[in-house]
Image: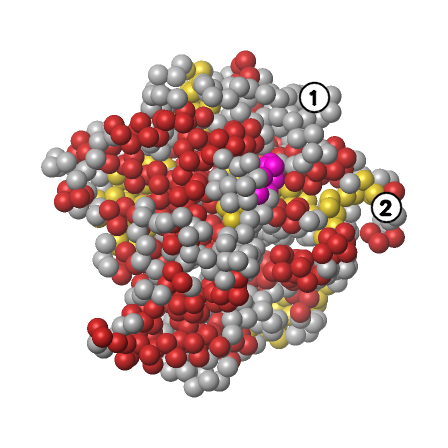
Amino acid sequence: MSTTLKNLTLKIWRQDGPNGAGRFDTHVIDEITDEASFLEMLDILNEQLIENGDEAVVFDHDCREGICGTCSLMINGQAHGPERATATCQLHMRKFSSGDTIVIEPWRASAFPIVKDLMVDRSAFDRIIESGGFITAATGGAPDANLIPVPKPVADAAMDAAQCIGCGACVAACPNGAANLFTSAKISHLNLLPQGQAERYQRVENMVETMDEYFGSCTNHGECEAACPKEISIDMIALMNSDYRKAKVKNRKALSRT
Amino acid sequence: MSMTLASPVLDSKTPDGPVADKWDNFKANEKLVNPANKRKFKIIVVGTGLAGASAAATLAELGYQVDAFTFHDSPRRAHSIAAQGGINAAKNYRGDGDSVNRLFYDTIKGGDFRSRESNVHRLAQVSVNIIDQMVAQGVPFAREYGGMLDNRSFGGAQVSRTFYARGQTGQQLLLGAYQQLARQIGLGNVRLFNRTELVDVVTIDGRCAGIVTRDLMNGEVTSHAAHAVVLATGGYGNAFFLSTNAMACNVTAAWRAHRRGAFFANPCYTQIHPTCIPQSDDFQSKLTLMSESLRNDGRVWVPKMAGDTRAPADIPEDERDYYLERLYPSFGNLAPRDISSRAAKRAVDNGQGVGPKQNGVYLDFADAIGRLGADVVRERYGNLFDMYERITGENPYEVPMRIYPASHYTMGGLWVDYELMTTIPGLYAAGEANFSDHGANRLGASALMQGLSDGYFVLPYTISNYLAQWLNKSIPDTSHPEFAKVEAEARDRYHRLASSDGTRGPDWFHRELGKIIWDYCGMERTEAGLDKALSEIPALYEEFRRDLKVTGGEFGLNQTLEKAARTEDFFELGMTMCRDALERRESCGGHFRAEYQTEEGEALRDDENFAHVSAWEYTGDATQPTLHIEPLVYEEVSFQTRSYK
């Protein structure tokens, strides 16, 4: 049964543009049912702001099912808020209490410049994928799908990695602003599968080095795994590092490419 | 009453020959563009979901110059990503009697004999190529212990032909297509315009000459010229406001093309998905789908007694009505979506609804957990169960889920011929944005199939048939005055909307509009209701024009302004939807007119008068569009009353 939360104080980061100064605006929500999602609370606030002639708070969101990876938000300093394995869009107000003060900020990472208010630019992620996050298989020439058996444990492990929604919480949570969990999830997905072997070492070298152009370095804090709404394991980073080390030898000489 | 025109303007360009040979005949006779000449052609692809990303990637691989547009920050965000259950393909890996013909027939029957036979047969044919292609790209489909691909069954079929990747099949397929697109972007073969929205289509001398876009970051309006334009911009389910669509899904691209001359087909064919989480509050922003695959193991029931408020566990077996199993014994809980949805509506209307608002029915896994164990159920549906618990706060391993139908998919869309070209030469529509393959109802796991079929295996073939004639001929570029004119109109429109200084934001109007459409053009439609909607929507639209408030200004990032423009297009679409529903005086698939039903309450088709596609031409008044008819000619299958008993 639903209950009503009363007297919530929101401190929301507002910033006019990438180079704006930025400030916290404070809004009080008198009451809201705990059935509401966190973003529905922001929807209601925005409707009020518009009716009062003020600019709505800009935030990224779309599917509201935790799968598209568009939503973000640092909520009380935690990427995607307090609930484990939950993206902001699936966080509900029942996780909060009457009288709470909630601080809402954008992802904080220099590789994700602020666009406006709570929206950031995550296109550095696309650049990493473009550099090698694929299997080259042009349309039309594929053999029968059952020609290459994939052992179930391998398919399951690849799927565990492939679940990444590309939201950027790992980067936002990392004290170094590193993108190792994101990058390693894609590398692991493709490098585990038999179809991905042909480009395995080229892929890892290209993707890691593109990642390094934009993001900080990993020092094994493990904050990324804790923040990940899909609970992707930092084992993926170990796998990536292992492949990267091998790649630096294998990619050097044709003779080593076995 | 609108005027009905005969069909000559709607040439479906269906190739000759028996239905099974049409696609091969097309490929054997179409015009091609040789590899060295492909780079002379520019193709614009709008939308980067399954259809758009796969089309853009494949066209670029072939050598065309491709510009891809998405209003998201990244192509990977498109709403194809949210499809849960799976993708159909006539692989017959189970040896359970599947074949191209069986998938073709199931899809025609599932669509209640309101789709174009030739298109559906092609879809069934290329379905097998899609699975091969996606596996080659590394989509981690579910596997059996021997390493072969696993399948599950889905509504409306008696074979297991659905391939899946846990409950995230759409995500994995979209990421596959996105990665293939990303490769082409990295190679410089595709130019990506992200956070850029189509705001108009430009036609010059009777052909599509390009598009006008708005950069969502700064409000800048720009022209883009091309030899051909593909709209892969999704469906219009958000007309209902509450739907399973993502928040930003909209009809703007398709509608703007419609206003420039592309006919809009069968807008009243909307799919209400039977298994969504019931609405809990008035300010709810969207409804969440629980995959239809859950109906493989979950049993749907309501208390036999109306107004029964006992906890589900306290209701004994003989006081439960497993109505799908009772009414449709051969398909049971896997009855198709339209049929399951209406059965749920009847139960709730009858007072047998469950949950705090008595607005749902149970989907119960107790038997499955007893039979298979909680671990197997968790393996199959774990992420869906977790999602349900996050949203409702209830644990479906212990208490039955509550579900209710919600707007999910739209079968209607831009009219296209066999080659996926709209009535504007050079303008194509792919995926959910077109009307082509699902008739009046779409079967589960067929949307992903259609999106990828259009993008990977249809458009790359059919588009050359149009382009060949433009080889070495000049086409207008963006300096043509028509581009300047359309740009100016777009700027004026956004300026007008941005200056709206009424009292209510766009969401308020969208929500009110959605209520009207849901009440009168939702799961059940009547002549009186539709007439009412056709007077209420224009009245609300007047209020929208008078009382809308948009803050934030015309330039710079302004999500309120974006919503206002999209809502405005939903108003016009809503009017044409209701007009279409009014004119279709029969019930078929997702279109249920209460006046036309059997004694058991099932849809009653009228094949004599309505075995046709209704394609609407924009006239300036969306309540009075002009109707054009494409008769549906069935050469292979014969009309049958759809029965799942």
Q: Which residue is rendered at x = 22% and y = 39% of the image?
A: B227
**Left or right: A50, with A41 as reference point:** left
Nearer to us in this view, B145 or B269: B145
| Helix, strand or loop at mark 1 | loop
Where residue A197 appears, as percent x and y from the top left, is 35, 65
The amino acid pointed to by label 2 is Glu
Please tell me whether residue A243 is drawn above or below residue B433 in the rendered image: below
| Helix, strand or loop at mark 2 | helix
State the extent of the magenta-drawn residues as a range: B154-160
Where residue A64 appears, as percent x and y from the top left, is 55, 57
Residue ID for mark 1: B598
Q: In which chain is the residue bearing label 2?
A: B
Where residue B139 appears, as percent x and y from the top left, is 44, 56
Task: Name the colouring of the figure.
Answer: secondary structure
Of the image marks 1 and 2, the number of the one nearer the N terminus: 2
Q: CA distance from mark 1 to mark 2?
A: 30 Å
The amino acid pointed to by label 1 is Thr
Majority SS type along the magenta span: loop
The answer to whether residue B555 is visible is no
* Quarter of the figure with the C terminus of chain B: top right
Where residue B191 appears, as percent x and y from the top left, is 26, 54
**Left or right: A153, with B425 as reference point:** right
Which label number is shown at residue B317?
2
User: To which quarter of the image does residue B35 belong?
Assistant: top left
Residue A38 is inside the magenta segment: no
Give the number of the mark in front: 1 or 2: 2
